[in-house]
Amino acid sequence: MNPLRIGTRGSPLALWQARHVAALLRPLAAPRPVEFVEIETSGDRIRDAALSQIGGDGLFTKEIQRALLSNTVDIAVHSLKDLPTTRVDGLSLAAVPERGPAGDAFVSNEYKHFDDLPPGATVGTSSLRRRSQALHRRPDLHLVDLRGNVETRLRKLKEQRLDAIVLAEAGLLRLGLESAITELLDPQWMLPAIGQGALGLECRSEDSPVLELLDRLNHRATRLAVLAERALLRGLGGGCLVPIGAATRIDAERLHLRGAVLSRNGDRRIEAEHEGNASDAEAIGRQLAEILLASGAAELLKSTAASTGRNDV
């Protein structure tokens, strides 16, 4: 019997995610065996430059998607915040399992709270979204690029004598590194990335057996939330090269979505919120994008894209 092949990056966090999905799949796929295929992506190979300098969108997903299309693997496991919203012909986002924590964590060996940082403190992050929101709150801070897997970034905190770094809470928890968390940042000012804390399971659109199998792993509330967030991002024309954050809440079939667009240096922040029936998740995301664009985000996105050399927003 042919194995069910899961394509994944080789980082510790990516492997944790792949093993987590495999554990969910094995009882459903039995007796078909499940195996892993590690794939190196452009983002893994290029580690000495900021993501915004090397292309950003799709850096951690394109090679895995190519492996799907070439029938080298059957399922791709992505961190959903890394997966571009542009659909790839022949592939389907078949499942979104239950989401982990969506927020960001402040990590410091010296300071208990973000607001305790002294003037001019040095903070490391690889995310334009985190950088812009941190500078919006504290324009005096010195933000530096910080690449590498979670363990590498924690090591650089000490080796480079940084005052603090900011990481995704979900990654730290999944790797058993929750003791490193100094403070969970308030999403009222540090909005999460689109899809942060969620996994996206992709497969070939014509592979009906795998589509049916993965559909059983869908978590309805999570899928609706990320569909709204991804529709917001698509409507804004943004990606990881533009500082955009969002937070979603679903209560009694009402989906509430809050989003913000910032300038790269954090001096401007345009924020809005919108809600509706959860079954209309994508429409809510599109409508919030229109609200933000009408509120001035269009001009902000255009100037941000120009500063990064982009012309697709």
Image (tube, helix red, strand yellow):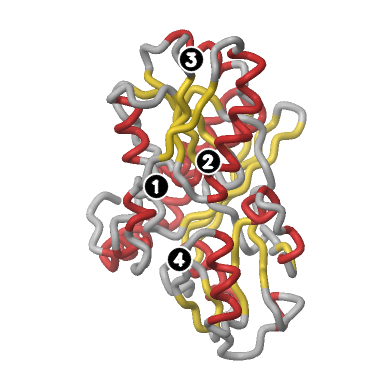
Q: CA distance from mark 4 to mark 1?
A: 13 Å
**Amino acid at the residue labelled 3:** Leu
Label located before the other in sequence (4 or 1): 1
Q: Report x, y in % for residue 200.
A: 51, 33
Q: In the image, 269: left or right of 169?
A: left
What residue sits 67% from the left and 70% below the top? 107
Label located before the other in sequence (2 or 3): 3
Q: Say whether marks 4 and 1 touch (CB < 8 Å).
A: no
Report the residue that reaches farthest toward the front. Answer: 1
Considering the numbered disc 3 on the image, is that residue within a helix, a strand or a loop? helix
Looking at the image, residue 277 lies above or below residue 100: above
Q: Report x, y in % for residue 229.
A: 53, 41
Kindly report which numbered mark, 2 or 1, lies closer to the viewer in this rendering: 1
Residue highlighted by disc 4: 147
Label located before the other in sequence (3 or 4): 4
Label located before the other in sequence (2 or 4): 4
Residue highlighted by disc 1: 60
Q: Report x, y in % for residue 276.
A: 63, 32
Considering the numbered disc 1 on the image, is that residue within a helix, a strand or a loop? loop
What residue sits 36% from the left and 24% below the top? 91
Q: CA distance from mark 2 to mark 1?
A: 19 Å
Q: In the image, 209: left or right of 305?
A: right
Residue highlighted by disc 3: 211
The answer to whether residue 290 is seen in the rendering is no
Q: Residues within 10 Å of mark 2 (few under 14, many from 20)?
A: many
Residue highlighted by disc 2: 229
**Amino acid at the residue labelled 1:** Phe
